[in-house]
């Protein structure tokens, strides 16, 4: 049975891509989007996602802000920065290179 909770180096790419299409999402919404858009195959757990979000924020790829929803609930939402958009392009190129190499190995072994 494949491990669907392990994104093996693709988490940054997935988060950046999701935020490029839907800005101002909170962590749970990002986790849900990964699960939904992958057809329920990929799952990002809190223990992986939140440290990644903080790391990407420190790198300048994301900007986070607190918003108040329903007068009681505060949510930390994330937006892609211009640096994050550049990093998304880099991550997509890197992913294409890696998946292409893996596919070559699978065809020849």
Image (cartoon, rainbow, N blue to C red):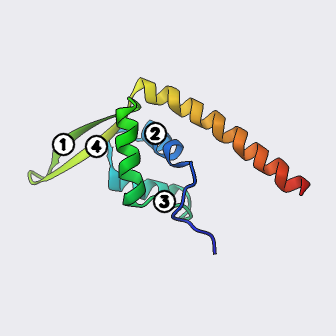
According to the picture, the residue beneath numbered tag 3 turns out to be 36
Element type where label 1 sits in the image:
strand
**Earlier residue among tags 2 and 1:** 2
Q: Nearer the viewer, residue 81 or 53?
A: 53
Residue plotted at (65% across, 36% down):
94
Element type where label 2 sits in the image:
helix
Neighbourhood count class around disc 4 (C-alpha, 10 Å): few under 14, some 14–19, many 20 upward:
some
Q: Which mark is residue 77?
A: 4
Q: Position of residue 32 (x, y in %)?
A: 41, 58
Residue plotted at (55% across, 65% down):
4
Neighbourhood count class around disc 2 (C-alpha, 10 Å): few under 14, some 14–19, many 20 upward:
few
From this viewpoint, which residue is outermost toward the right? 108
**Earlier residue among tags 1 and 3:** 3
The answer for how far apart the CA atoms under marks 3 and 4 are is 19 Å
Left or right, 21 with respect to 74, comes to: right
**Earlier residue among tags 1 and 4:** 1
According to the picture, the residue beneath numbered tag 1 turns out to be 67
**Earlier residue among tags 3 and 4:** 3
The reply to whether discs 2 and 1 touch (Cβ–Cβ < 8 Å) is: no
2 or 1: mark nearer the eye: 1
Q: Which mark is residue 21?
A: 2
Residue plotted at (84% across, 48% down):
104
Left or right, 101 with respect to 47, comes to: right
The answer for how far apart the CA atoms under marks 1 and 3 are is 24 Å
The answer for how far apart the CA atoms under marks 1 and 4 are is 7 Å
Neighbourhood count class around disc 3 (C-alpha, 10 Å): few under 14, some 14–19, many 20 upward:
few
From this viewpoint, which residue is outermost toward the left? 71
């Amino acid at each position: 049975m494949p491990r669907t909770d392990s994104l093996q180096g693709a988490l940054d790419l997935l988060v950046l891509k999701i935020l490029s299409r839907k800005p101002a999402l909170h962590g749970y919404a990002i986790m849900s989007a990964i699960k939904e858009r992958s057809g329920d195959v990929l799952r990002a757990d809190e223990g992986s996602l939140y440290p990644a979000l903080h790391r990407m924020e420190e790198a300048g790829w994301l900007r986070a802000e607190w918003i108040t929803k329903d007068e009681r609930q505060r949510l930390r939402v994330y937006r892609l920065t211009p640096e994050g958009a550049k990093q998304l392009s880099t991550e997509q190129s890197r992913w294409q290179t890696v998946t292409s190499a893996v596919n070559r190995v699978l065809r020849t072994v």
